[in-house]
Image (tube, rainbow, N blue to C red):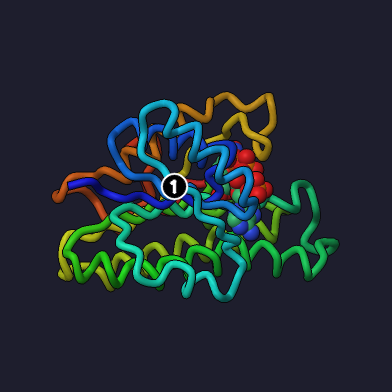
Amino acid sequence: MTRTALVTGANRGIGHETARRLADLGFRVLVAGRDADACRDTAAALREAGGDAEALTLDVTDPAAGETLAGLAVDVLVNNAGIFPDYGVSVFDVAETTVRDAFEINFHGPLRIARALVPGMIERGHGRVVNLTSGYATLDGMGGTLTAYRTSKAALNALTCILAAECESRGDVKVNAVDPGWVRTNMGGPQAPRSPAEAAADVVHAATLPADGPTGRLLKRGEPVSWNQGN
Ligand SMILES: NC(=O)c1ccc[n+]([C@@H]2O[C@H](COP(=O)([O-])OP(=O)(O)OC[C@H]3O[C@@H](n4cnc5c(N)ncnc54)[C@H](OP(=O)(O)O)[C@@H]3O)[C@@H](O)[C@H]2O)c1
């Protein structure tokens, strides 16, 4: 039976590469993004490469996103969409709106989408959720600046644990966070040591964990690591 994967922010960066790899593995991929034309182009390119893909216009900040997703049977959810809006900005200077925007996209988006899709996974007895997090979010070793990014991703880490706990003993539903390291994307910039392909391999690993794999964990390079492992 064909499994379905939904990847948010799938038109570029780590999300795009993850969508491509999941399509190569035989998943039907829902290419989710806020730019409808870009989603159509990405889905068309995946189909041209022999995959099964459909475009899904989805801004994760849309309060109606849950209704858009209602009724979709999704086996793998990759909460990849994210922003990194306050690099180098002091906690004393960051605008409140910047912090709110980061929470809206990096935390409320995944919460909204998980609430729409995970109950279906529990009903069907199987599912994988992967939340893209960052070493900047871990509490031990957390430095100054990046208040919006760090706190919104730390909240996402907490959500990962809460969701995993509520899914435990309710079928084979696993919820993990992946720290992809520093990656060469629009967000990471050209100096980053890791390629989107390397990061996507980590995400796909978490998206395809076997039944005896971990849940409620932070995964780095495919291995569970301490939630306190900071940058
Ligand atoms: N790059 C790194 O070094 C690094 C390190 C640790 C963690 N991460 C995490 O990995 C994830 C992907 O990062 P990346 O490096 O691939 O970043 P990227 O190249 O900047 O891509 C970000 C993606 O998020 C999408 N997005 C932003 N706001 C959205 C919204 N409101 N609704 C839907 N989609 C939205 C963007 O869509 P548009 O094309 O429409 O803007 C884009 O597809 C992020 O969660 C990031 O925090 C990245």
Q: Is residue 141 visible?
A: no
- Give coordinates of residue 54: x percent, y percent: 44, 47
- Give coordinates of residue 183: x percent, y percent: 57, 32
Q: Residue at point 63% right, 33% down?
A: 185
What secondary structure is found at the residue carrying circle 1? strand
- Give coordinates of residue 107: x percent, y percent: 55, 65
Residue 209 in which image quadrant = top left
Q: Amino acid at mark 1?
A: Glu
**Which sits in the foreground, 227 or 110?**
110
Q: Residue at point 48% right, 33% down?
A: 17
Task: Judge from the rendering whether residue 168 lies leftward or rightward of residue 90; answer left or right.
Answer: left
Up the image or down, 67 lies above or below 60; here it is below
Q: Residue at point 52% right, 30% down?
A: 196
**Residue on which disc 1 sits:** 54
Q: Quadrant of the C terminus?
A: top right
Q: Is mark 1 within 8 Å of ligand 1?
A: no
Task: Judge from the rendering whether residue 28 lies leftward or rightward of residue 90; answer left or right.
Answer: left
Up the image or down, 16 lies above or below 157; here it is above
Up the image or down, 221 lies above or below 139; here it is above
Task: Judge from the rendering whether residue 140 lies leftward or rightward of residue 77; answer left or right.
Answer: right
**Which sits in the foreground, 179 or 42?**
42
